[in-house]
Amino acid sequence: MSSPVQKPKTRRGKVKKSKQIELFSNTVATGTEEKIFSVGQFLDLLNIGLRTSEAKIVGEVSSCDFRLNYLFFTLKDNDDGSAINCFMWQREYRMSGVVIGEGMEIIAHGFPEIYKPSGRLSFHADSIELIGEGALKKAYDELRQKLEREGMFAPERKRAIPEYPEEIGLITSKTGAVIHDFLNNIGKFGYQIKFIDSRVEGQLAVGELLAAVRSFRDKDIDVLVVIRGGGSLESLLAFNNEMLVREISRFPKPVICGIGHDKDVPLMALAADIAVSTPTAVTRVLNSSWEQALSRVRLAEREIFGAYHEALLRKRHTLEFALALPKYFSACLDAVNDTISGYQKTILAYDPERQLKLGYSIARVRGKIIRSARDVYPGDALDLTFADGMIETEVKKIRS
């Protein structure tokens, strides 16, 4: 099994954060020398430090406004009235799959940042999600109805899995238990598994899952497999994301989803060609055609060897009869000779030449044997055949 672990580059890595912290420390640690910054330099320095304060914050949307490629909104704390200004790239907002409005309670993930032209602190959100089972269920139902009206989940859109799949694309988390369940049950049929590691938990997984699915578009695979364990509606947020569901429905190869769920089937599973609830069930789907083929081969093997054994037994009995019982073999030869003699006597009895030797002749007119006086006419030329020759004559008169 080949399993090159790949990580879609959709988020800031730990290495980059470490370098930012190191740069921040080196810039501040000036020893006894007094360091003087320009305003821009100081704000850049602060932003480097703030970038490490990545967090999730919850609040009520008190205002929201779209400007060019940005979404600007304000989150308010209902307990003490605190508020923070937030902004978000429109592309990241669409990827979140949430339509926000004033009065909604949401969770925003991101980091604080100072906008240099105004010196105002804002929260740079890179993903948002709804909070509360009721809100999530409502969003799930609305999106499901929308996609059903488009026919995205229609049975006629489902594609058959190749009869004997060999190249499998696998997307899941390398740290989860499901990948071990999958690999332990995949069987010994020589699959080539191409693996891409991705988050599978919560809203932050959307970007990595999208990148992984798109990466497999250009790879030579027979089927794409996406698996994760069970979870609540909150933990399965990514698999109900509209962008990801549409990406799965447009994928050029058949897709199998093994996504565990408590109650509501993830929309990504509904859009897949085959949906099962466990990684082990996915392996049963992949192995079924190979196991059936193996059973047919074993059955054919038994039939071939059985027929060969029966043929050997028949030949063995024939040889034993011919070699160990010569008197019966001689009797068989005598019986065959008697049969041949009987055929000879029958042939001789019906031989026309024998009848000619007894004084009979054969009369023909125009090459045909004459069986009645009505077959000839006066003036016809007759051929009379005897045992020792032939006479040509002519009919002068016919008497009935």
Image: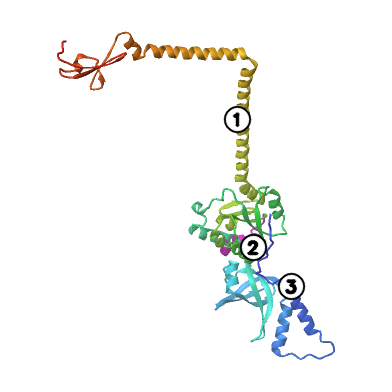
Q: Secondary structure at mark 1?
A: helix
The amino acid type found where label 3 is placed reads Val
Q: Which mark is residue 233?
A: none
State the image coordinates of residue 116 (x, y, percent, origin top left). 66, 85
Quadrant position of the N terminus in the picture = bottom right
* Residue at (65, 16) in percent of width and height: 324
| Magenta residue span | 230-244
| Lower sequence index among marks 2 and 3 | 3
* Residue at (64, 18) in percent of width and height: 323
| Residue under pointer 1 | 307
| Lower sequence index among marks 1 and 3 | 3
The amino acid type found where label 1 is placed reads Ala
Inspect the magenta stretch and tell me whether residue 240 lies in it: yes
| Residue under pointer 2 | 132
State the image coordinates of residue 151 (x, y, percent, origin top left). 49, 57
- 259 or 113: nearer the eye? 259
Q: Secondary structure at mark 2?
A: loop
Gap between marks 2 and 3 measured at Cα: 34 Å
The amino acid type found where label 2 is placed reads Gly
* Residue at (65, 76) in percent of width and height: 124
Q: Which mark is residue 15?
A: 3
Q: Are marks 1 and 2 in contact (CB under 8 Å)?
A: no
Asked if 292 appears above or below 108 in the picture, the reply is above
* Tag in front: 1 or 2: 1
Residue 312 lies in quadrant: top right
Q: Are marks 1 and 3 in contact (CB under 8 Å)?
A: no
Inspect the magenta stretch and tell me whether residue 268 lies in it: no
Residue 53 lies in quadrant: bottom right
Left or right of residue 320, residue 340 in this image: left
Asked if 129 appears above or below 373 in the picture, the reply is below
Extreme residue in the front direction: 388
